[in-house]
C-alpha cells in the first residue's frame, strides 16, 4: 500500500478559504462536506484532515498528521507554551490570513511607549506571545488569560488593556479601543512533523512543496508585453518590477521599435503602466500567469 501524506487544515474559519484555495491551485481536489472531518485527494496520495485551528499544531506534533496549515500566531503561541523542542516545525509562510497581534487600550489613553503598560492587566488569548513581548520590552504587566471576546474585557473592568488579533481594526474601534503596539505579525504558515518521513512520503511532500512554491510565486506575477523604442529597452527593463531578463523581439518593418515580453514577479499597478508609456511604450498588455515552475 502506498504511504499517504496527511495534511491538517482548518475546517471552517478565517484560514479555511485560503487553505482550500491553495490546495486547489496545487491541483488537489477536496470535497468539502459539511460534517466531514476527513477528505481523500484523488490526484496525489494525500489525505486531508479538517480540524479546529487550535488542534492543528498538536495533531502535527503528535504525528496524527504529517503537515498542517496554521496561523503563525497560533503556532508560535503553542511553541511558547509547549516548549521550543516541540516536534513540529515551520516550513514556509503562505502569504494569506495576514493579521497582527496588538496591544490595544481605551481610546482616551495617553500611550507613549510600552512603559505605559507597567502594572496594567492585559486580557489576551495569547499569554505566551504577550508575556514574551512584555519581557523583551522590559515591562512588568499582568496578562489575564481569556478564551474569547477579549475586546470587551476593559469595558467589564476585568482588564485595563487587551492583546488581540487585529485585521482591519473595526472590532477594536467598535469597543472603544485603539491599537497601541504590535506584538507579533502573522500569516498562514505550513508546518511539519520533525520526524523523518518515509522516502515515499518525503517524495510526495517534496512534490507538494514545489507546487505550493509555484502557486505562491505566480500569485502576483504577471506576463507583460509591449512595443517600445529600441533605445528605451534598458530604461524599461530597469523599471519593470521583479524582472530578470526580458525577451526582446524585432518588429517587422519597424527597425527602431521592438516588442518586449517579460515575467514580472510582483504586481503591476496602473501607475507603473503610465510610467512605461512615458518611457515610450505602447500597446501594453498585462496577463495573469496561471502556473509557474522554476
Ligand atoms: O473554529 P476554530 O477554532 O477553527 O477557529 P477560530 O475562531 O479560533 O479562528 P479564526 O477562524 O477566527 O482565525 C484563524 C486564524 O486566522 C487566526 O489564528 C489568525 O491567524 C488569522 N486571522 C486573520 C484572524 C483575523 N485575520 C482576524 N481578523 N483571526 C482573528 N481575527 C479576529 C479579530 O481578533 C477580530 O476579533 O476577527 C475579528 C475582526 O477583526 P478586525 O480587526 O477586522 O475587526
Ligand atoms: Zn480556534
Image (cartoon, rainbow, N blue to C red):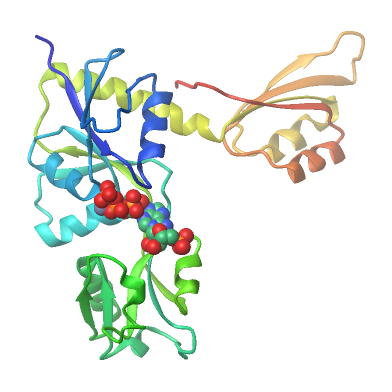
- Against 226, is 136 above or below? below
**Residue sitting at the far front:** 35
The residue located at (7%, 41%) in the rendering is 62
Residue at left 13%, top 41%? 59
Name the residue: 10% across, 50% down: 86
Q: Answer yes or no: is residue 72 visible.
A: no
Quadrant in the rendering for residue 198: top left
Nearest the eye: 57 or 212: 57
Q: Is residue 257 visible?
A: yes
Residue 177 screen position, x and y as percent: 45, 78
Residue 248 in the image, given as x and y percentages of width and height: 73, 19
- Location of residue 81 by image quarter: bottom left
Q: How many numbered marks, from 0 up?
A: 0
Residue 188: where, in percent of width, then height? Answer: 35, 45
Q: Where 168 sits versus 4, above or below?
A: below
Task: Choose between 234 and 199: the one closer to the eye.
Answer: 199
Residue 158: name its quadrant: bottom left
Horizontal arrangement in the rendering, residue 199 relative to residue 142 (left or right) = left
Side of 9 relative to 282 (left or right) = left
Residue under the point 85% across and 37% down: 277
Where residue 52 sits in the image (x, y, percent)?
Answer: 23, 45
Q: With respect to residue 77, does 110 lie above or below?
A: below
Q: Is residue 163 left or right of residue 168?
A: left
Ligand 1's quadrant: bottom left
Identify the image quadrant of the N terminus.
top left
Amino acid at each position: 500500500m502506498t504511504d499517504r501524506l496527511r495534511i491538517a487544515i482548518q475546517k471552517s474559519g478565517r484560514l479555511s478559504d485560503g487553505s482550500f484555495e491553495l490546495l486547489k491551485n496545487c491541483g488537489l481536489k477536496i470535497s468539502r462536506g459539511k460534517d466531514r472531518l476527513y477528505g481523500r485527494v484523488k490526484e496525489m496520495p494525500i489525505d486531508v484532515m479538517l480540524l479546529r485551528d487550535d488542534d492543528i499544531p498538536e495533531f502535527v506534533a503528535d504525528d496524527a498528521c504529517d503537515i498542517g496549515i496554521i496561523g503563525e500566531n497560533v503556532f508560535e503561541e503553542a511553541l511558547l507554551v509547549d516548549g521550543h523542542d516541540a516536534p513540529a516545525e515551520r516550513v514556509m509562510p503562505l502569504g494569506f490570513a495576514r493579521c497582527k497581534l496588538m496591544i490595544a487600550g481605551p481610546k482616551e489613553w495617553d500611550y507613549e511607549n510600552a512603559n505605559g503598560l507597567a502594572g496594567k492587566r492585559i486580557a489576551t488569548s495569547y499569554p505566551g506571545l504577550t508575556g514574551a513581548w512584555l519581557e523583551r520590552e522590559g515591562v512588568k504587566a499582568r496578562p489575564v488569560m481569556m478564551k474569547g471576546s477579549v475586546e470587551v474585557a476593559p469595558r467589564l473592568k476585568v482588564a485595563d488593556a487587551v492583546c488581540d488579533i487585529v485585521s482591519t481594526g473595526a472590532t477594536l474601534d467598535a469597543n472603544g479601543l485603539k491599537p497601541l503596539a504590535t506584538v507579533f505579525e502573522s500569516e498562514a504558515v505550513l508546518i511539519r512533523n520533525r520526524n523523518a518521513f518515509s522516502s515515499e512520503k518525503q517524495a510526495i511532500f517534496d512534490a507538494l512543496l514545489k507546487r505550493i512554491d509555484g502557486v505562491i510565486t505566480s500569485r502576483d506575477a504577471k506576463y507583460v508585453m509591449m512595443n517600445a523604442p529600441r533605445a528605451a529597452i534598458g530604461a524599461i527593463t530597469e523599471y519593470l518590477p521583479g524582472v530578470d531578463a526580458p525577451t526582446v523581439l524585432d518588429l517587422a518593418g519597424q527597425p527602431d521599435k521592438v516588442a518586449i515580453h517579460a515575467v514580472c514577479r510582483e504586481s503591476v499597478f496602473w501607475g507603473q503602466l503610465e510610467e512605461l508609456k512615458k518611457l515610450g511604450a505602447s500597446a501594453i498588455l498585462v496577463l495573469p500567469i496561471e502556473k509557474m515552475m522554476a
